[in-house]
Amino acid sequence: MAGSQLKKLKESLKAAGLTGQTNVKRKGKKNAPSETRRDDRKAVINAIREEFNPFEVKMNRNKRDINEARKSKVVVGRPGISKQIGEEQRKNAYEANKKLKNKVGGVVDRRFGENNPNLNPEDKMLERFTRERQLQSSKRSLFNLEDDDDDNNNYYDGGDDDNNVLTHYGKSLSLQDDFDQGDLGLPEAISSNRKRSYQVEDEDEGEDEVPVQRKKTKAEVMKEVIAKSKFYKHQRQLQQQQTENEILDLDDNFEDVMSSLQEAAVQNKKQFFDKKSEQDIAYDTKLRELALDRRAVPSDRSKTDEELEKERAEKLKKLEQDRLRRMEGLDIEEQKDKDAVGADDLDDDFWGNASENEEDGFTIKESEDEDEDEVETETGKENSISEPTPNVIKIGNKIIKSTTSLNVVKCPETHKEFLDLLSKYEFCETPEVVSKILNTYQPRLAAGNKEKLAVFSSILLNHILHLSNGDHENKQEFIDVEEKLIHQLKMMAEKYNESLCETFRMKIVEIQERINENQNYPEVSDLIFYSIVGMLYSTSDLYHLVVTPTLILMGQSLESLKPNKNLKNLISGLFISDLMLKYQRISKRYVPEIAYFLEEAFLTLVPEVNKLNAEKLSTVFSTKHYAKNGLNLNKNDKITGTYNLKISDINLDHENLKNLEIKSALLVKALDILGNFISIWKEQSAFIEITTPFIAVLRHLVKYQAQYTTIPELLEKLVKLHANNLHKPLQLQDHKPVAIATFAPKFEENFNPDKKSYDPDLTRQEIGKLKASVKKERKLALKEIRKDNKFEARQQIKEKKQEYKDYHARMARIVNSISTIEGAEKNDYEREKKLRKNKR
Amino acid sequence: MVVKRKSSSKDKVLAKKVKADSKFDGLFSIEKIKELCDELDESAKFLNNIALLLQQYDLVLPQLSGAAGKELEDFIVLLRFLTVSILHVFEKLMVKEFFVISKGIDESKLKVAKWLRLKYQFFCYDILLEFFSLDIEEQDNDLLNSFKIDVLEIVMRLIKLESTYFAPNPNEPYFSLPLYKKLIIKLLTSGSHEGIQQNGVNDNYLVLEFYEQFFQKNWDLKFFFLSETCNILFKEEEEKEEKEEKKKVKDLQLIFSNFLVIMRNSIYKDYEIDSKQFFVTNPPSVIFKKNQFKINFEKTWLNFLNFPLTIQQYKQTLLILHKRIILFFNNPTKLMDFVTESYEIGFSNIIQRDEDDDEDHEDSIIISILALNGLYELMKNYNLEYPQFYEKLYKILSNKNLLHLNYKSRFFRMLDLFLSSTHLPAQLVASFIKKLSKLSLTSPPSGIVIVIPFLYNLLKKHPSCMIMLHNTNHDESYKDPFIDTEEDPLKTNAIGSSLWELQTLMSHYHPNVLSLAKIFGQPFNKYSYNLEDFLDWSYNNLLESELHKKFKGDISLEFEKFDKLLEKGKNDHEKSEISYMTGWQW
């Protein structure tokens, strides 16, 4: 729009039709009444005035925005007007507040159940209704305003009754009269509740007066509902009452019925007894026995061999899977995961965990126990055919009773007690004594037996080791007893795992002390101990409470036993190497000590060790001090495979070194171990490095002992393996490359500065929005409150001023009036005085 | 009173013996000795009593060797009393200035003083010091030993007295060197070969007593000990020249073992001489000369190092060399020859002295390892240039027992130091890495546990060696290029090889070693391992930590069934019973 301000004004006035010809009649348009037109005119002029007042409008110009298209969207505000509006609103509120000040206004809602959220509308209505009725009935005697018959009436409705009308000066006091006079309209501000009730009143009246069918109002519907529900309730109550009554009746009659019945039964019985004969009685007992006999359950049927086989295979498979898991160390990780669960976590296994924490917390579940028992008896049956193994509880028991006179045995609590007990029996009866104890103290027989047997299991272990150290005349008998005891120990280990484990660990500490003091080591019992550990426990586990310490101990033994020192070291070292390989037969973990010891053992045994090329060896620089120990074979000795190595050979004198048989047996054993060694570790990537020294040894050995076929065979195998096992360079660091954190800013296409956030995370974006709005709201609210306060203060000051002003004005008026009167009186006085003077 | 009665009863016994054996005629009783001493105290006219008392020794000493049991005890009681009495007599005379020889005293006094001095010297040198070499072949040596210790104390007392009263002029600083010198010689040659312990130190009680009671505390004794020993020992050696070779070697080893007892602890803890205690009241000022002390120290040690040492003594010396010896040398470069020689020992089997050459080679390599410390000290501080240092170092690694030694942690500390430079050629570092990982294949867990973090740190420091762990560039015809027998670490081609050994260790039987070895398969993002944490593991503390572990889980059992633990006999196979350990019988 162009032109000056004045021009614009003129134009707009003209457009509004306020200038120029004013009484142009427009076609087709009715003339509006002049009054209203004048008002319109005012409004239009006001609008124009406002439009042209540049100070009334505030524009929020965006300085940053250079986009032309947006210019139209400039925010325009009219602060003056909005301020005025606010002011007015405040004023209204303030005045309303002021009116209510020091007054308790409004009507208290005392209707029953209005504030009780637990009542549903129906109940609420019902309750109100009853209360109302009660109120009425109590009032009835005095001012009975109600119609007795009419249920639907409420108590405002008193006007219908012609008989009892309250009157005052002959005029009816009925409230409804007031309503008839339309002038007395209730103010708008009255509470809506009340208003509604009046309306109800109105309608009631209408119904009575005009009984024409019409659409029901809400109140009517409500009334109907109330009535119906009341009716139904009443019916229900009636029904209830009825049934209760019936029950009571029955109860009363019960005694009579019973007594008559009993009488009849007694009579019958008497008849029965009279009739019974001997035969019958026998029959009865048989019958009873049959009834009490445990009935065969379908699941207990004897399984076929195939099924048994399958079951066993499945069980083995499961055990194997568990074992593999342990071998990989997965169970430890699981354990860690389990431990990671917080302390508050009350999972199902909480108590299980807690009990594990305790000293002897490994509770064996009963169900498992039973399973084991079953297995035991099963295996027992199988074994019993070949030989009477004592772990079979039932069968073994019978045998004992028939063969020996073992009566009551006390469960020994120490090894000494056990020895005392055994001293009463023959040596060969030891296993039977043990199984007797096991029988007498079966855990299911009495409480506390389990603990006793747990102690006994460790005694048994000690006893086995004790026996193995001793010297026995009857070797065969000793071996039998020892093997049987070990068998029993293995059976017990399943049940008394925890305490046995403790015993094993104590034993480990004891052996270690002996190794450190370097005396009496190794004994036969130590070697037996190691092998029992291997036989009892799963040696392939990554970590095992008993096996891992035992492995360390064996490693230490191999390290400290120098084979070239004496025969004892050599034999026990070979035994331990053999055993350690046996331990690793499944997990195939590498034991450096074996490689070290085996090489030394070979150097100790091979003939003419000086001629061996030391460069290839991994343990020693020079072989010269292996030449002197006297254990080496002679140049012309030939290996004979006739001697069987015994574990007790470690106690042989050094003199036996000259015994070619032992020497060759040792060499054969070493070769045997080497064979095992190769087959277990042929997968190792450093297999070539590990076995290179042995090739040198075997090459040397084959020169002297070519007739012993094992040696060339081993050599050939080893060379072949070396040829096949090509070293591939390692690729251990083949990790997925880790992304480097980028710090370059992300470029946004079509960037919009108004858009508050480009956050890709939706929830975060939402949260941001919410936060922003909360902040904004808060700001606004604070602003409002401040404005309110200011307004109030202003208003108060204004009032005060007004008050003072009024006061001063009033006082002035009073003073004025007084002085006027005074002046008048004075004038009167003066006049009187003059008069009197004149009179005189 | 009781004591007196006791002594008197002994007198009677003695008296009886005297009567019984006519040879004992001249032997005084204790009371007689006391009487003579009392007379001496009273006036100077009884001075001749000294001669009488001294004569007693001539009578007693021959008897000693034949005596035994109770008799010996009596003799020693007598001897002790006699010696102490004479000491008191001389002490009193010294206090009374009977010994003073200076101008301006009259003839008779001078004569007396000279005579007294003669007697005194006879007492000191010919009697007291000879007690140390006194030896009787009896089981109850304790009596004699305690007496010897008493004599040692008496001699020290006399040294103190001499230093006070024998000064040429009164109040002049003086230290009684001649007596001290003799004492040192006696002490060093005392003890027996059997007393030489495993660590090359003698358990000679006299030397120990001397060290603890006197030497340790007093600076002047230390100073003069060093200054005298370096003078004495030449003579000593010359004297021994005549003796047969073997005996001489043994004697020298004995002397060294005694010397080591005195020298094994730091000779002086702080350099401040002023704060030191002194044994004599007025020591000569020469002892405050730090330089003189150092020169003496150096001379003495160099002399001693020329001795034919046992291997144990060698080890012991090398152990203290870098901390307690090099520091006090005036010119530490003089030790170079010794250290380099010792270092070389490991590479050539020089040591043949030890009869039991079972651990011969092991010992020589230990000596090399021990010499490394001293060598490093000299190289670092005194500019020693050692040619082909890394070749030699690499050669130590070719000792196949290295990881089984007790001194391995010491070696690894040094090796860590030598290989810490990032400017070493990758070839060389790779050779060390490969050699160490090869050694770990036969080593106990304690060794492996050192090697793994060590190699990790090395690989971290020399990323170019990472190719030994991760090599993607190879063809089908790849063959391990490493030459195990090559002695030059730059020519072993180790960098083309791979560390299969470490991969094998990832399946070690010990779970902790296994998990430690697995770091080579994980990204190399650890900063580095603190080697000290891994140096001192042994089977014992591995087992201990294992036994302390509480593993929450079932103790898994073996489910495989075995009929027997060991084989029963030959007919076992026929029965087809499975035994756990095959090929072994009860």
Image (cartoon, rainbow, N blue to C red):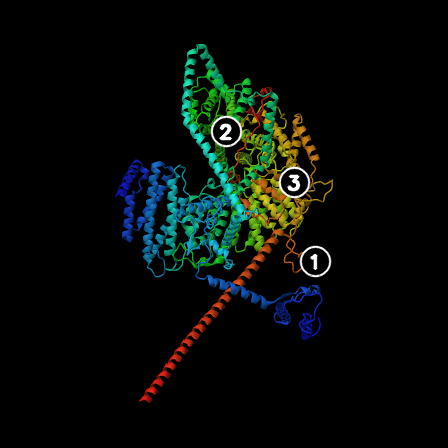
Chain letter of disc 1? Answer: A
Tag nearer the camera, 1 or 3: 1
- Residue at mark 1: A750
Q: Is residue B348 visible?
A: no
- Residue at mark 3: B500
Q: Residue B323: give x, y in percent of width and height.
A: 51, 51
Q: Residue A465: give x, y in percent of width and height.
A: 49, 28
Q: Residue at x 41, y 37 (%)?
A: B137
Do dots 2 and 3 share one subunit? no
Q: Helix, strand, or loop for circle 2?
A: helix
Q: Helix, strand, or loop for circle 1?
A: loop
Chain letter of disc 3? Answer: B
Q: Residue B578: give x, y in percent of width and height.
A: 58, 24
Label 2, label 3: how many angstroms apart (C-alpha)?
A: 49 Å
Residue A320: quarter of image: top right
Residue B399, placed above or below residue B285: above
Chain letter of disc 2? Answer: A
Question: Disc 1 residue type?
Answer: Asn
10 Å crowding of disc 2: few (<14), some (14-19), many (20+): few
Relative to B502, is B83 on the left or the right? left
